[in-house]
Image (tube, grey):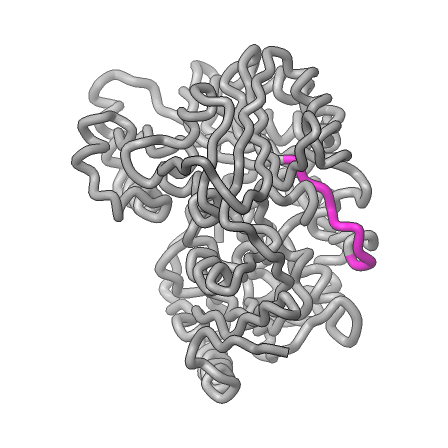
Amino acid sequence: MAQAQVQAVGGAAHEAARDALRAQLAGMPPGHPVRLAKRTSNLFRPREATGAPGLDVSDFTHVLSVDPDALVADVQGMTTYEHLVDATLAHGCMPLVVPQLKTITIGGAVTGLGIEASSFRSGLPHESVLEMEVLTGDGDIVTATPEGEHADLFRAFPNSYGSLGYALRLRIELERVHPYVRLRHVRFTDLDALQDAIGQVTSTRVHEGAPVDFVDGVVFSADESYLVLGDWQDHAPFTSDYTGQRVFYRSIPQQSVDFLTVRDYLWRWDTDWFWCSRAFGAQHPLVRRLWPKRLLRSDVYWKLVAFENRHHVFARLDERRGRPPTERVVQDVEVPLERTAEFLRWFLREVPIEPIWLCPLALRDTAVSRAGWPLYPLEPGRTYVNVGFWSTVPIADGRRDGDVNRAIEREVHDVGGHKSLYSDAYYDEADFWAHYGGETYHAVKAHYDPEGRLPSLYDKAVRRR
C-alpha cells in the first residue's frame, strides 16, 4: 500500500499537539464557556463575548497523509477544505463531499454539517468519516468509530457544533477524480417540473443519455430556474474561468454547456460566495476590475460581515438615509423532495429573496447511515433538497426582528424538513430538542461533558453563547 505523506507532521508531533491542547483545557478557569480560538469561521450567528481565552488549535491544520490506493486520508480537524483539496488532488482524488467555501474546516463540516453537488450520491461529509479523534468536554481524548466503545459519540457528533467536543483528527474516505467537469444548465419555467426532474436525475443518475455525477441548481424566480448537471470528463474543448472578472451564477442562464477544471469546479461558488459578493459591490464591473483577484474569496466577504456585525456601519448609514432596518435571513434547510415545489412557492411568495440555491441529498446506503444520525434525523432512503437563501429583508411595520426566520422555521417543520444551525435560530427549548435529537444528545452530553464545560447545543444555536 503506497502511503503518501503530505506534511512533515507525524505521530509524535500530533501527539504533542494533543497533549498541549489537553493541558490548555485543564488550565482554563472553571465555570467559563470553552471555545476555539479560530481565525476563521463560517457561522452566521453572533455570540456573546466572554472574558475566557479560547483553545488554541493552530497546530491542528495539517493533512497528515493521503493514501491514493486505499482512498483514505488522515486529516487534522482544523484543516481547511482548500488545503485538503490541494493535497488530495495532487494524488488524483478528493473528499466525497467538498463544501463550497474554501475556509470551511473538515472538523467544522462534520460537527456542523456540510453539503455539495455530490451529496445526492455521497451524502454529507460526516458519512465518509471512518474514525475521529475527539477532545471531549471532560478533557479526555477518545477515538470514536461507528462501532465500539465510543460509537455513541460518533453518531451524535454530527450537528453538535462543538458542544460535545472537538475533532482533532479524522480518517475519511476519498474518491478518484477526472481532470474536468462538464456542466449542463437545464432550464425550467415551472417549479413542479423542476422537482420532477430532480427526482428523475437523482434516482437514475442520468439525464438525456449522459451520466450525472453532480447536481445542484438555482431558482431565479418562480418561472425561471436551472439544474446544473455535472459529469466527469477526461478532455475538454474549452474551460471557463470564474476566479476573476466573470461571475459563475450569471453564466448559468447564458450558456447551456460549460467546462471547468476539477479544482475550479469545486470552488466555483467561493469566488463570489455564491452571489453574496454583490452586497459589497464586488460584481460591479468597475469595482470588479479594481478588486484584487486574490481577495475575491468567501473568507474576505465573511470578514466584512463580521466587521459590520461589530460596528454596524452600514446599518447606521441606512438609518440616516431613511431606510427601514433589516432582518438577516441566512439559512439552509432540508426539504423532502416531494414537498420542494410547495416550499419554494411559499418562500417566493412570503420572503423577497432571490436567487435561491438548491442541492439534492440523500443519506448513503451504509449500516451507520441506515441507523440514522440522531441530531439531524434525515430519513434513510429518502431524497431531500437543500434550499439555501442568504440575504436580508426589511422589517415591516408591526414585525419584530426575527419574525421572518420564525415563519421559515414553522414552514420547514410543516413540510417535514430540517434546518441547519449555522445561523440564527429562534426555537423554544422544547421544540428545539424535539427537532434535534434531545434524548440522545443529553445522554451523550452527560457521558462526555458531565460538568458542562462546553456550552450546550441549544445555548450555542439559539442563545448565541
Q: Position of residue 240 (x, y in %)?
A: 39, 36
Q: Quadrant of residue 2?
A: bottom right
Q: Quadrant of residue 308?
A: top left
Q: Is residue 323 above or below residue 364?
A: above
Q: Bounds of the magenta span?
A: 360-368
Residue at image point 74% right, 43% down: 378
Residue at image point 19% right, 33% down: 289
Magenta-drawn stretch contains 414:
no
* 125 relative position to 81: left or right: right
Q: Nearer the viewer, residue 262 or 329?
A: 262
Q: Nearer the viewer, residue 337 or 311?
A: 337
Residue at image point 42% right, 26% down: 251
Residue at image point 56% right, 68% down: 167
Q: Position of residue 17 (x, y in %)?
A: 46, 81
- Res 168 seen here: no
Q: Nearer the viewer, residue 334 or 128?
A: 128
Q: Position of residue 125 (x, y in %)?
A: 62, 54
* 222 relative position to 313: left or right: right
Q: Nearer the viewer, residue 424 or 114?
A: 114
Q: Position of residue 464 (x, y in %)?
A: 49, 49
- Res 311 seen here: yes
* 102 relative position to 277: left or right: right
